[in-house]
Amino acid sequence: MNHSEIVSFIWGVADLIRDTFKRSKYQDVILPITVLRRIDCVLAPTKSKVLETNAKFKGKLENLDPQLRKASGFTFYNTSRYDFEKLLADAPNLAVGAIFGACIFNLAIIVILDLLYRKGSIYTSASQGHILSASFGIVLIGFNGLGMNMALNGKAFAFGHIGVYSPVILVLYLVAVYTVFSYESRQIKLYTEREPDAFPNLSLSAVILRYIAAASVVIVTGIFLPMVAKQIALIMHWQESFVGTLLVAFITTVPEMTVAVTAVRIHALDMAIGGIFGSNLMNNAILAVEDIVYKHGPIFSKISPVHNVSVVTSLIMTGFAIIGLFFRPEKRILKMVGLISWVLLSLLLMNSYFMYINGKTA
């Protein structure tokens, strides 16, 4: 490229920032970023050496500057783990962490419901039919975990940029939805023959409109959430896997928690429990969709192995939830929640602590 072409390319960036910045401020954005990008390219060959040197001598030497200059080969250096390539890349760790973290937080909602439901143990009051959707949840989480471990061990079998496990997950999700729907249809028929309509004055169209309005709010906030989360990771120097698994996952679980608690208040315990396991099924299907739209290869080949802990935690928590629904224990420990709920809470805390200590960066 000649000089004029380079100038045209740089100022062509104005098309990308139009309406975001005032026209008089374009140069305040484009020129500094251009300089920073040039510095980033210059430092790239010695980037890893600088990070290793910083980690080696940090806390041991009072003045790291001479060592870091020597490592970079210049009079300047960058000790942040981020460069332009990482900043511009998608955040697969954030996405994957949010999914498996949401599965864990969803299952932890059972603890809250067990605490609030005072008519007895939720494990004795809830339908055992939830075991079906919970079991499908184990299957989907297991398949995603299998795909993750294959990818992390260099066996990322793929169709183009899509992992072979993603189509399987989508098919399994559809099978799960159909199976659960068929089962619940039979149960609803028996229920409606015995119970009157709890909301006779509420029409189907009104319900649909309210559903769309509520879903729209969730979708709009969900669009901006990853951007905010990535900024938090940058500012706090936290791993995206940590931010996704804890912060993003918790925020995305708040709607499920609100719905579940409200359902219990209107005496719809089965709706609350069904929403938890159904949400986990959807989460795993979303992960397959994320893999499809991620263009840089199978998404599991770009993530940290730390997510394996969340996968295993999700499987164990789902297993204990199934045990509770099948065995149906009635006793509350400390007059608060049942033993299964205490186990679920303990697993949530252990996973959160592990992600925290492994999510901080130097």
Image (cartoon, grey):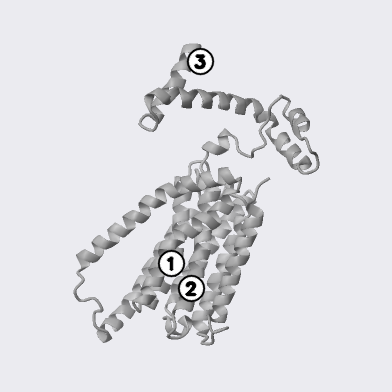
Q: Mark 3 points at which residue?
A: 1
Residue pictured at 57% horizontal, 71% vertical: 345
Badge 3 or badge 1: first in the primary sequence: 3
Q: How crowded is mark 3: few (under 14 residues within 10 Å), some or many (20 or more)?
A: few
* Residue 37 image position (x, y, % from top left): 56, 27
Q: In which quarter of the image is residue 26?
A: top left
Disc 3 + disc 2, Cβ < 8 Å: no
Q: What is the distance, in whole Å, between disc 2 and disc 1 at their CAs? A: 9 Å
Q: Residues within 10 Å of mark 2 (few under 14, many from 20)?
A: some
The label nearer to you, 3 versus 1, is 1
Judged left or right of residue 265, residue 322 is right
Query: Pointers 2 and 1 in contact (CB under 8 A)?
Result: yes
How far apart are the alpha carbons under marks 3 and 1? 56 Å
**Mark sitting earlier along the chain (2/1):** 2
Amino acid on which disc 3 is placed: Met
Above or below for 265 versus 91:
below
Amino acid type shown at disc 1:
Met
Q: Where is residue 119 in the image (x, y as percent from the top left)?
A: 42, 85
Residue indicated by mark 2: 112
Label located before the other in sequence (3 or 2):
3
**Which residue is depicted at the point 67% across and 36% down?**
79
Give the crowd class for mark 1: few <14, some 14-19, many >=20 residues within 10 Å: many
Where's residue 302, x and y in %? Answer: 58, 46
Which SS class for mark 2?
helix
**In the image: residue 294, left or right of residue 216:** right
Residue at the extreme front of the image, as rendered: 62
- Measured in 3D between alpha carbons, the distance from the residue under mark 3 to the one under mark 2, in whole angstroms, is 62 Å
Say the numbered circle drawn on residue 52: none
| Quarter where residue 81 is shown | top right
**Residue beneath label 1, please?**
257
Amino acid type at circle 2 is Ile
Q: Which residue lies furthest to the top in this view?
A: 3
